[in-house]
Amino acid sequence: MHTETMHTASTDEFLQDPDHPRVITLAGQIQAETFQPVGEDGTLPAGDVLLTVDQLDQLSAISGRKGVILRATDSPETLSLPLDQLDLIAIEFKGFADGRGYSFATLLRRQGFQGELRAVGDVFKDVLYYLKRCGFDSFVLKEDKDLQDAIAGLQTFTAGYQFATATPQTHYQTGRTIS
């Protein structure tokens, strides 16, 4: 019971005041958050819902878009997620030094997840380009970070040398020049 309360409180941290949207898309647009957590009393909100892994049994009762938040302990390697029923998977980054979220995104894309992958938690400008290369579609920045400044982080580099989930063949591998 205590663990569930901690999950719900932590999920609320990533949801924003609609007057101050903090979701950045790959296109560099700022959008309002539409996903809401399950109420503390267990009530499902109307519209788009963000569940914890422990709440996935409520998926069929959601009328709007369906999302789940994965924490560092919720590895896609050990979970059987209903990927075809989810519109959004939010992946929490607890701290800068914890790279499990990058691996989770890559694994989910390799498992065939076609929906939106959103990075939440300790997310800031300097990591956006790398998150994008792992397959993330949107990002929720830490509260103290400037959104306009961070958007530039999506274009930090024009091309990568290595293969990545978001770029199956780089210019280096294909012989194409960068324009």
Image: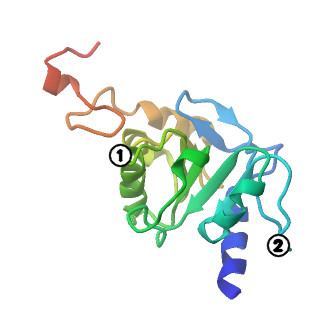
Q: Position of residue 119 (x, y in %)?
A: 53, 51
Its colouring scheme is: rainbow
Secondary structure under badge 1?
Answer: helix
Q: Position of residue 141 (x, y in %)?
A: 59, 50
Vertical comparison of 144 with 24: above or below: below
Q: Is residue 171 visible?
A: yes
Q: Residue at x 40, y 44 (%)?
A: 109
Question: Crowding at label 1, few (<14), some or many (≥20) Cα neighbours within 10 Å?
Answer: few
Q: Earlier in the sequence, mark 1 or mark 2?
A: 2
Q: Residue at x 64, y 64 (%)?
A: 56
Q: Is residue 53 left or right of residue 163?
A: right
Q: Position of residue 157 (x, y in %)?
A: 34, 31
- The quadrant the C terminus occupies is top left
Give the residue pinned by disc 1. Answer: 110
Q: Which picture quadrant has residue 44?
A: bottom right
- The quadrant the N terminus occupies is bottom right
- Rounded to the nearest whole Å, what is the CA distance between mark 1 and mark 2? 34 Å
Q: Residue at x 42, y 41 (%)?
A: 135
Contact, mark 1 vs mark 2 (Cβ under 8 Å): no
Give the residue pinned by disc 2. Answer: 40
Residue at the limit of the structure toward the front, as seen here? 60
